[in-house]
Image: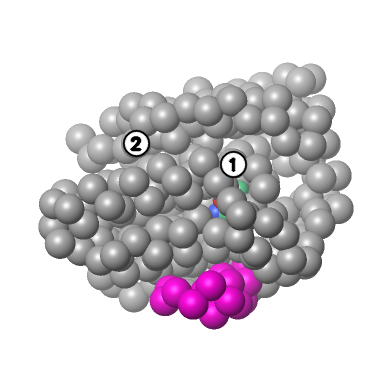
Amino acid sequence: MSEVSEQQQAIAAAAKEIISTNPYGIMDFRGQEIIILPKVFPADCTTPFLSERMSEIARDIVKQNGSCKALEMGAGSGAAILTVAKEKGVEAHASDINPMSSLCVQANAMFWGVDCQVYNGSVFEAIPEQKFDLIFWNIPFIPHDPGGVEAVEFRAGFDPGYKFQRNFLETVPRYLSSEGRLFLGADREMCDLDELFGLIENCGFSHSIYKENPESWRGFDFTYLIIELKQK
Ligand SMILES: C[S@@+](CC[C@H](N)C(=O)[O-])C[C@H]1O[C@@H](n2cnc3c(N)ncnc32)[C@H](O)[C@@H]1O
């Protein structure tokens, strides 16, 4: 892991504070009410953009194949995958390491009246062997450990050493169909992109920036990236 700059330390400290005080309740998501349970990542940041882009991809896959089996890793509230699930021809699946998130996805699926198979566990550990046409993960951005981020709600922002990311990238080929598409949501300022791109390369993928979007969230300006990965 490269040396942690003062700016990265400041970002990690601020993210720790933000996650500790995350709001919960009924919120607005692109004009629709969504349930955010305590300790769940609120869908008010990069999630709307991600949900639109992944819906477009799912639509394309349905056009091509007649159906699309989609998995969101680390689904949080479920806002993104449940948006994708509304598309005709999509079969939606979601997993999260945080039990409160898995519950939240189930609650929102019922609230929105859409179907989604929900799992709880670290990366693929709870997901039976099967193939997906689309897999995406809005990743925990920060690979530094500011201390005090062991509780499961901090997995929303912190993946010290990108340990879980490595585990995900090493396992994901088993779950991807031959033409399956794979995306990571990341960020220019909060992620260690050198480290992340190195890891992607080492795990046998090439990458390209599929879309990027300027975002502003709780006093932070940053650039959100949707990265497409292809097996080499
Ligand atoms: C940045 S949040 C994104 C949440 C949601 N996808 C969204 O866009 O609103 C990252 C999510 O990944 C989950 N996560 C972190 N580490 C994980 C792991 N090892 N396995 C599964 N999910 C994990 C977190 O609990 C959190 O819900």
Q: Nearer the viewer, residue 67 or 135?
A: 67
Q: Which quarter of the figure is the N terminus placed in?
A: top right
Q: Nearer the viewer, residue 183 or 198?
A: 183
48 relative position to 92: left or right: right
146 relative position to 95: left or right: right
Mark 2: amino acid: Glu
Q: Nearer the viewer, residue 177 or 218?
A: 218
Q: Depth-wise, is mark 1 or mark 2 nearer the camera?
A: 1
For image coordinates 29% across by 65% down, the residue present is: 88
| Badge 1 or badge 2: first in the primary sequence | 1
The answer to whether residue 149 is above or below residue 198 is below
* Ligand 1: image quarter: bottom right
219 relative position to 92: left or right: right
Give the tally of numbered discs. 2
* Image quadrant assignment for residue 216: top right
* Image quadrant assignment for residue 31: bottom right
Q: Residue at label 2?
A: 228
For image coordinates 59% across by 41% down, the residue present is: 46
Q: Is most of the magenta stretch helix, strand or loop?
A: helix
Confirm or deny contact between disc 1 and disc 2 (CB under 8 A).
Answer: no
Q: Is residue 143 visible?
A: yes
At label 2, counting other C-alpha atoms closer than 10 Å, the crowd grade (few under 14, some 14-19, many 20 or more) is: some
Magenta region: which residues?
A: 101-117
Query: Which color scheme did the rendering employ for the protein?
Result: one colour
Q: Under tag 1, what secondary structure? A: loop
Residue 116 lies within the magenta run: yes
Q: Is residue 195 visible?
A: no
Q: Residue at label 1?
A: 46
Q: Does the beta carbon of the residue at mark 1 sit less than 8 Å from ligand 1?
A: yes
For image coordinates 46% across by 59% down, the residue present is: 83
Mark 1: amino acid: Thr
